[in-house]
């Protein structure tokens, strides 16, 4: 089993055929294609619980919200690059992309 036991957080990539997933208590974000074949894996910077995974409207960037983390991670899928978005809040609890653009 890729994710072990417990809750799995997931988010389908808009307009594409990938699903991003992470299991409870795990550090690795795993990507599967629509046939269930694992196509990618990325290690997050901490083991904090993932609360939410959210793709931007074009399916290019995946935002990763973790419990007790002051920053949001951004995974640029095409570039295979993990970036940190610094927040002006101590512990964000929800995130959402603009429906109109990539902001």
Image (spheres, helix red, strand yellow):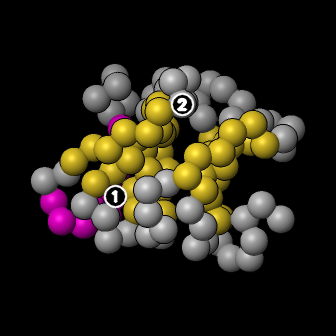
In percent of width and height, residue 88 lies at 13, 53
Q: Is residue 91 rendered magenta in the image?
A: yes
Q: Main secondary structure of the magenta part?
A: loop
Residue 98 lies in quadrant: top left
Q: Which residue is mark 2?
A: 80
Which residue in the protein does label 1 denote? 94
Helix, strand or loop at label 1? It is: loop
- Answer whether residue 68 is visible to the viewer in this image: yes
For label 2, count other residues whose C-alpha is less than 10 Å away and answer few (under 14), some (14-19) or many (20+): few
The stretch of residues the image draws in magenta is 89-97
Image quadrant where one finds the C terminus = top left
Q: Which residue appears at 34% of the width and 25% of the height?
A: 102
Q: Residue at x 72, y 65 (%)?
A: 3
For mark 2, give the secondary structure: loop
Q: Relative to 6, is 3 above or below?
A: above
Direction from residue 60 to residue 17 in the image, left or right: right
Q: Which of the two discs, 2 and 1, labels the residue nearer the N terminus? A: 2
Q: Tell me residue 41's x, y (percent).
A: 65, 45
In the drawing, what numbered circle is on residue 16?
Answer: none
Q: Is residue 83 above or below residue 59?
A: below
Is 25 contained in the magenta span?
no
At x 74% / y 76%, what residue is drawn?
5
Q: CA distance from mark 2 to mark 1?
A: 24 Å
Image quadrant occupied by the N terminus: bottom right
* Quarter holding residue 7: bottom right
Residue at 38 percent across and 47 percent down: it is: 73
Q: Nearer the viewer, residue 65 or 45?
A: 45
Circle 2/circle 1 CB separation < 8 Å: no
Left/right of residue 50 with respect to residue 24 in the rendered view: left
């Amino acid at each position: 089993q890729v994710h072990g036991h417990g809750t799995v957080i997931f988010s389908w990539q808009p307009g594409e055929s990938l699903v991003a997933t992470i299991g409870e208590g795990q550090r690795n974000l795993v990507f599967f294609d629509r046939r269930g074949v694992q196509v990618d894996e990325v290690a997050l910077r901490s083991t904090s619980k993932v609360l939410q995974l959210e793709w931007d409207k074009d399916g290019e960037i995946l935002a990763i919200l973790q419990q007790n983390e002051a920053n949001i991670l951004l995974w640029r899928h095409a570039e295979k690059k993990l970036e940190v978005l610094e927040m002006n809040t101590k512990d964000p609890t929800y995130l959402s992309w603009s429906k109109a653009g990539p902001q």
